[in-house]
Amino acid sequence: MKNTVLTFKQAKEKGEKLTMLTAYDYSTAKLIDEAGVNSILVGDSLGNVILGYENTISVTMEDMIHHGAAVARAAKNALVVVDMPFMSYQTSVYDAVVNAGRLMKEAKAGAVKLEGGKEVCPQIQAIVQAGIPVVAHLGLTPQSIHAFGGFKVQGKTEEAAKKLLDDAMAVQKAGAFCVVLECVPAKLAEIVTKGLEIPTIGIGAGNVCDGQVLVYQDMLGMFSDFTPKFVKKFANVGEIMKEAFTAYCKEVGEGSFPGEEHEYTISDHVISKLY
């Protein structure tokens, strides 16, 4: 069944858990979609796992459109959510609506995601009023790591916890249909989840959230530069890939690949005419 804003709302009402994984290319998105994952996030995490940046700040609109369109071509049932990159919405409400529109028109997104609480509510409201579904993102917001002083758990003090709660209520009121909670203490995420009418998607926020999201390279053991505490490796695909690459090098080097079964034939008669 096609996943939509409405099916996300219904899942929350029924107490059914939602699943989300990142993808940045057609082939991977097709596999994720066929597995029945509810939503594919084309995250600006592509800056880290695809482009090799230290953080997400260098990711551009063109990057998100390019990768988002590839994913959208593969997703038949999953709801495709595309991240709005750094400085594509912070500058003004006008810029936010224009860039969200580009992600819908050019990347074929089903929804957009942007980071921040009360400070971006005018942008959320304007984007929603333009007919574009919005996923909010609270807690550890990677585009703000310099302000946070690094990748740190958010909402651990009374003041910070109250702010996160207030921000969650604010983004819901502004029109977001869903909110990602990243690196938030599980008990705080539970309070937020129970207090909201819209679903919460957790990443490092405990299992009481209405759904979960992971970067697929993390959960498959394909990205080893840094592994957050909240990541579970469901398979060690990275090691399998390295073994296959090593075997390929060995067989090419020793001349055992390609074998006869991989070759195309031509009649000896034709060959004889060449001499």
Image (tube, rainbow, N blue to C red):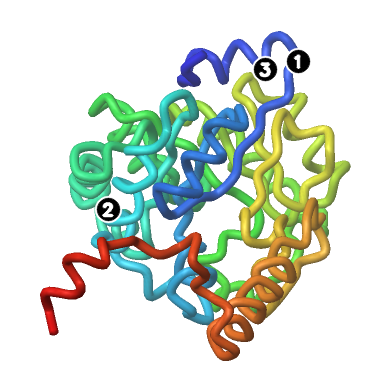
List the residue tagged with mark 2.
Answer: 65
On screen, residue 209 versus residue 168, left or right, reads right
| CA distance separating discs 1 and 2 | 33 Å
> Are discs 3 and 1 less than 8 Å apart at CB?
yes
Q: Which amino acid, mark 3?
A: Lys
Q: Which amino acid, mark 1?
A: Gly
List the residue tagged with mark 3.
Answer: 12
Which residue is located at x 81 percent, y 55 percent? 232
Q: Which amino acid, mark 2?
A: Ile
Which residue is located at x 62 percent, y 32 percent? 35
Picture coordinates of residue 17 (x, y %)? 73, 24
Q: Label 2: how many residues lie within 10 Å, few (<14), some (14-19) or many (20+)?
A: many
Quarter the C terminus occupies: bottom left
Q: Nearer the viewer, residue 13 or 126?
A: 13
Question: Looking at the image, is mark 1 or mark 2 earlier in the sequence?
Answer: 1
Question: Looking at the image, is mark 2 or mark 3 earlier in the sequence?
Answer: 3
Q: Nearer the viewer, residue 186 or 65?
A: 65
Res 34 → quadrant: top right
Report helix, strand or loop for mark 3: helix
| CA distance separating discs 2 and 3 | 30 Å
Picture coordinates of residue 79 (x, y %)? 46, 30
Which residue is located at x 76 percent, y 50 percent? 161
Label number found at residue 15: 1
